[in-house]
Image (cartoon, helix red, strand yellow):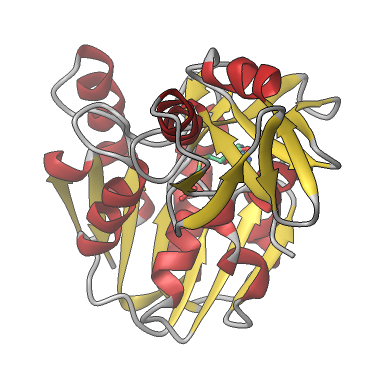
Amino acid sequence: MPCIVLSHLQVKDLLEARAAGRNSARVSLDLGLTGSEVALRPEGVALPGEQLLTWQDIETIRSSETGCFVIEDSTPRKAQIFSEETNRLYSLMPTGGAPTMLISGIPMHRIKGTDPHRDTLQKIKSIAPVVGRVLDTATGLGYTAIAAAKTAGHVVTIELDPAALEIARLNPWSQALFDNPKITQIVGDSFEEIDKLGEAAFTRIIHDPPAFNLAGDLYSGEFYRQLFRVLRPGGRLFHYIGDLESKSGRVVSKGAVRRLQEAGFSRVVRRPEAFALVAYK
Ligand SMILES: C[S@@+](CC[C@H](N)C(=O)[O-])C[C@H]1O[C@@H](n2cnc3c(N)ncnc32)[C@H](O)[C@@H]1O
């Protein structure tokens, strides 16, 4: 049975139904992907698997604006993991649509004026058509890998921190990352793993790293030369930077454009709507 995951956005519906005196309610048990009918009892809400979530636990979930809660054995557990490997805290944060992942408090997708799902589609669109073999250098919640696998032949996706993948496992919106046979996962550092990938092996590369100050290696000339090497002639690289109009975005993109050109990319185009650069081989 898939995990039941709730945030303040879903339990609000339960509390409203209770306040209206109803004995059942329609609610999403998977962060908005689907809807389910549940029974409301004086002591709590009856959930699939003979679970009962108390009204007190529901209040706890409601009071957390940034947390998602997995329900197991009638008990809510916050979807968060501290990584011994990187000394960072990973957690799932709800939005009106697909959740994002926070790494030590920093969201890994755009959530202002958009949501992680629309953000992902924008990324994919900037290197459309996404066909052939695709390299995704930073798995995260797997949204880019999942979206690419819809049209690509195969996707290879690399994640540094197993804690990020544990969070993805809890996320209903990430399940295709684990179920889709067109996606191959590698756990490791992209900076090192890319050495093992063949020359001209990919038609498209999605490079969606954490911010420059968290993952400087992934913005280096050395790494860009490797991206160039594994990309097929005629291939395209999507490189997320952040808001190109912001002060840091201007500085980071300027350096990145220069290093991408030095690495051999024939054309590097700014895509402000996707907060990104697109480079052509
Ligand atoms: C912005 S998120 C990626 C979001 C992802 N594209 C998605 O659609 O959900 C960046 C991810 O890169 C991972 N990461 C950081 N450094 C890395 C590295 N050197 N190699 C591979 N992954 C890395 C982080 O743990 C994080 O999960």
In the rendered structure, the answer to whether residue 29 lies left or right of residue 54 reads left
Marks counted in the figure total 0
Residue 270 shows in the view: yes
Q: Position of residue 74 (x, y in %)?
A: 80, 38
Task: Report which quarter residue 199 is drawn in.
Answer: bottom right
Residue, x 68% and y 31% (percent of image)?
44
Q: Position of residue 173 (x, y in %)?
A: 51, 55
Q: Position of residue 66 (x, y in %)?
A: 51, 20
Residue, x 22% and y 71% (percent of image)?
128
Q: Quadrant of ligand 1?
A: top right
Residue, x 33% and y 52% (percent of image)?
120
**Vertical comparison of 73 with 7: above or below:** below
Seen from the viewer's position, the closer of residues 87 and 281 is 87
Seen from the viewer's position, the closer of residues 40 and 13 is 40
Residue 104 shows in the view: no
**Vertical comparison of 54 with 213: above or below:** below
Seen from the viewer's position, the closer of residues 171 and 261 is 171
In the rendered structure, the answer to whether residue 119 lies left or right of residue 37 reads left
Q: Position of residue 156 (x, y in %)?
A: 58, 69
Task: Report which quarter residue 33 is drawn in.
Answer: bottom left
Screen quadrant of the C terminus: bottom left
Screen quadrant of the N terminus: bottom right
Residue, x 45% and y 57% (percent of image)?
35
**Vertical comparison of 135 with 123: above or below:** below
In the rendered structure, the answer to whether residue 47 lies left or right of residue 244 reads right
